[in-house]
Amino acid sequence: MAEKIQQLESVVIRSLRQFRDRYFPDKVVKDDVTVTDMGQEEPQLGFLDRLPVDIQFLIMTLLSPADICSLGATSRYWRAMVRDPLLWRYFLLRDMPYWTSIDHVTMPQLEMLDAPLISEDESLDDRQEGEDKVMGFKFDYMSEYLKGCPSCRQQWLPSRPAYGVVTSFLQSLVPSSEPRYAMFGPGMEQLDVSFVTRLMHAPDVLPVAGIPHRQINSIGSGISYIFNNQHKFNILTLYSTNRAERERAREQQQSISNKLFICEGTDDSGKPMYSPAPQVQQVCQVVDGFIYVANAEPGRGPTTGEGEFEVAQIRAVLDCPGGSASKPLLVLSCISREEPEATRTTSQQDSGVSSRCRTPCVYMAKRLGLPELSNRWMVQDTVAQTLSGLLDGISWLLRASGVKLYGS
């Protein structure tokens, strides 16, 4: 990955340099004025305009996306420079592994990163100085980046009107039904730190509200939690097998037979097909959404074949008879603990690329086949030990279920 980014970096610099030489060749800096080929004197170029292109590129790599867009508003020259598609392709490749969440609306088109690099001449022709037409590229890398980057999403969300806050406050005074969610997935069983145990003993994150009286045969009633000290919700935990078998499989690092699903063979393409077990079907019919805990630890996640099983089992739950295609899916892309900064290798620290010891959420979404789903979904990076990221995921899930969150 680092080699690919470095290669793209050199291509971006060549493209920017060629753009500058092609569209600003008549401007020659001379003492305190800039002399054009018509003999007219113009004010001297700005300090940033006079810098070498590779330095300008370095400066842009240190700016936030919002700052880069602001830079593009300062002049026609910078407007064209910051719209370079190769520049934003570089940003996508560099920053996507560090995004902490992605959803069905903001998911970028990953195939764009596998597309062959466009020629420098094509790049220049589509971003001529002062040109307002839409660039003729198959992929708009800038739009894909700004759409998917978590910091951009938060910064450019429309502000909430005052009447919305009042409405939410009044709604919070009216008792509402307690939403229920089914939680399952290998991340609950394969990690060194038990996610479910931490969840049940973290009153500072999600206080336990109790165990409701509603029962589902062979499943139980789940556990109720309180979000933001005012919204109660219930989680039904679905394990693939009993505790003894899970502990044995974890110690021996072996896969176990999943008793939540019944294998129905394969489809025409050879991919596995599943249907939920009878007790799981009951759960799917009564819950308001699903939480899938995925194992995001490198080297401990599924192989290519096992990944197909994950996709098939998620689809089996969402397509369960009696269910609804509108039920949201929250994927907690979970690791046991964060890697300490000091344990990262020198090469990782120097490159600053893909040094996080987890599967990036964007690639987790691709692995689970989420872009092909009709349901609303979100992937949220989570750490079992600290439960970091969990509240962001629960907040999204409650809103996707129709819960009006006061103050959000």
Image (spheres, rainbow, N blue to C red):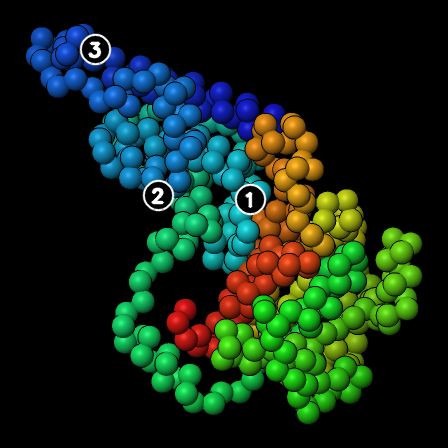
Above-or-below relation of 57 to 71? above
Cα–Cα gap, marks 1 and 2: 17 Å
Location of residue 174 (image quadrant) = bottom left
Q: Label 1 amino acid?
A: Tyr
Q: Name the residue at 60% across, 55% down.
A: 381
Q: Residues within 10 Å of mark 1 (few under 14, many from 20)?
A: some
In this view, the residue in front, 135 or 101, is: 101
Which secondary structure, mark 3?
Answer: strand
Cα–Cα gap, marks 3 and 1: 41 Å
Q: Earlier in the sequence, mark 1 or mark 2?
A: 2
Which mark, residue 248? none
Across and down, in percent, residue 360 comes to 61, 47
Q: Name the residue at 11% across, 17% down.
A: 42
Which mark, residue 98? 1
Location of residue 32 (image quadrant) = top left
Across and down, in percent, residue 352 comes to 57, 33
User: Would residue 229 appear left or right of 213 to someone viewing this image?
Assistant: left
Which secondary structure, mark 1?
Answer: helix
Across and down, in percent, residue 398 comes to 52, 73
Q: Name the residue at 23% across, 30% down.
A: 76
Find out whether the residues at labels 1 and 2 contact each other: C-beta distance under 8 Å. Answer: no
Residue labelled with disc 2: 66
User: Would residue 191 appear left or right of 43 to someone viewing this image?
Assistant: right
